[in-house]
Image: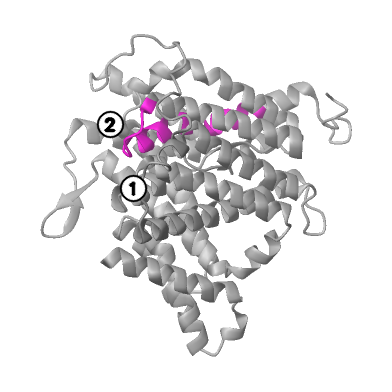
Amino acid sequence: MKQYFQFREHETSTKQEFMAGLTTFLSMAYILFVNPTILADAGMDEGAVFTATALAAALGTLIMGVLARYPIALAPGMGLNAFFTYTVVINMGVPWEIALFGVFLSGIIFIVITLLKIRELIINAIPAELKYAAAAGIGLFIAFIGLQDAGLVVPYESTAVTLGEMTNPTTLLAVFGLLVTAILIVRGYQGGIFYGILLTSIAGIIVGLIDMPDQVVGAVPSLAPTFGAAFTEVASVEWSTALILQLLVVVLTFLFVDFFDTAGTLYAVANQAGFVKDNKLPRAGRALMADSTASSLGAVLGTSTTTAYVESTAGVAAGGRTGFTSVVTAGFFLLALFFSPLLTVVTAEVTAAALIIVGVFMASSLRFIDWKSFEVALPCFLTVVAMPLTFSIANGIALGFIFYPILMVLKGRGRELHPIMYVLVIIFAAYLGFLSE
């Protein structure tokens, strides 16, 4: 084992890798409770999603550790799960089973792209500003959902939304959770989001807002409600032109967000660990293959897109240097399967802080956008604001991808665009056209 993971070359040890793997797990364990809460809004069984989340994270992380030998963990991605539920299922009206099929297809396409080694071509085709805008927009979208779950933002007839009732006990619990989690992060605690969820749940139990769970450890929830559902509905659904176009946009969005999120995360974590040499990442193909395979497996199990987590940097900071760190993290996700009874105490108010804070982290990419160039600023601005205001990640991406090429051409910068961008203009324009019918 030590020879396979090259402990001596990376100047590490079993103890150091174990602690790094535990640190990574604690930093991202919140997804075990947040993901089922979000996907339950799509009509999916919460217990089954919990099991699918843990298994997808464990399998994806294990593949990353053994195949690519990187200390990078994977799990169902934040933002992608929100897109799955609130845009695809609720706004578009696509059955969650078909949405899972879309996740599966995006994973397969990702695998093909990786095998054909055309990753760089696609990365270069999408302007960097639009990538940053999409990440920031998804962050605002997630934060908006968190603010609603907290009761801080509520519907209002005259102004669409307004400030919620601040004396509401559940809102106060959510504010407490946000404050506690923020303090933990500011003070530098690894796994601050997870500990924030834990402390908020305990506070909710103490004040009587949350019922004490009957048990802490229990049987693993059945996967039956979600396992293979991505394929059972495909055969029986009535396919129409509108549904096919919707599925195409869904697959493109899943692929777009996962592809660039994974690439960015891989380079960020690998650079911190000192793996990047001459701006190149060794075994990058294997890492991308692990990510795309995990997405397809996750869809079969019953969860939204599985992707690399930037929280892996916490494990690297704790000394993780090899794939054994990921193996340890995967082991903890498997162990977590037996703690499903805790789902009853992790309510929407409890997880609200996690959504808001993850949104803050994602919105930080706004600083990389050239706001002085209007032909860049307007498409990016539309991408960012349209996601929360139309409650759809796909709408934001569509508007940005339509306006960007048009303004660049009118500015005389059309030669800077890759031909793929013109194809995407047609696809997203058709999508918005069908959406308005």
Vertical placement of residue 269 versus 177, above or below: below
Relative depth, front residue between 375 and 231: 231
Residue at figure coordinates x 11%, y 56% from the top left? 157
Magenta-drawn stretch, dominant element (helix, strand or loop): helix
According to the picture, the residue beneath numbered tag 2 turns out to be: 173
Q: Is residue 225 visible from the viewing direction of this image? A: yes
Q: Quadrant where the C terminus lies?
A: bottom left
Q: Residue at x 31, y 29 (%)?
A: 347
Q: Which residue is mark 1?
A: 86
Foreground residue among 95 and 139: 95
| Image spot of residue 39 (x, y percent) | 38, 37
Q: Residue at x 56, y 85 (%)?
A: 414
x, y percent for residue 285? 74, 49
Callout 2: helix, strand or loop?
A: helix
Q: Looking at the image, do the residues carrying marks 1 and 2 touch, with CB atoms under 8 Å apart?
A: no
Note whether residue 69 is visible: no
Q: Disc 1 to disc 2, how far (Cα)?
A: 24 Å
Rendering coords of residue 351 (x, y %): 37, 34
Q: Is residue 216 magenta?
A: no
Q: Quadrant of the N terminus?
A: top right
Q: Quadrant of residue 85?
A: top left
Residue type at mark 1? Tyr
Horizontal arrangement in the rendering, residue 47 relative to residue 292 (left or right): left
Give the number of the mark in front: 1 or 2. Answer: 1
Crowd band around label 2 with a 10 angstrom C-alpha radius: few (<14), some (14–19), many (20+):
many
Colour convention: one colour
The amino acid type, in three-letter code, at marker 2 is Leu
Q: Which stretch did the figure color magenta?
A: 20-46
Q: Earlier in the sequence, mark 1 or mark 2?
A: 1
Residue 32: within the magenta?
A: yes
Q: Quadrant of residue 123?
A: bottom right
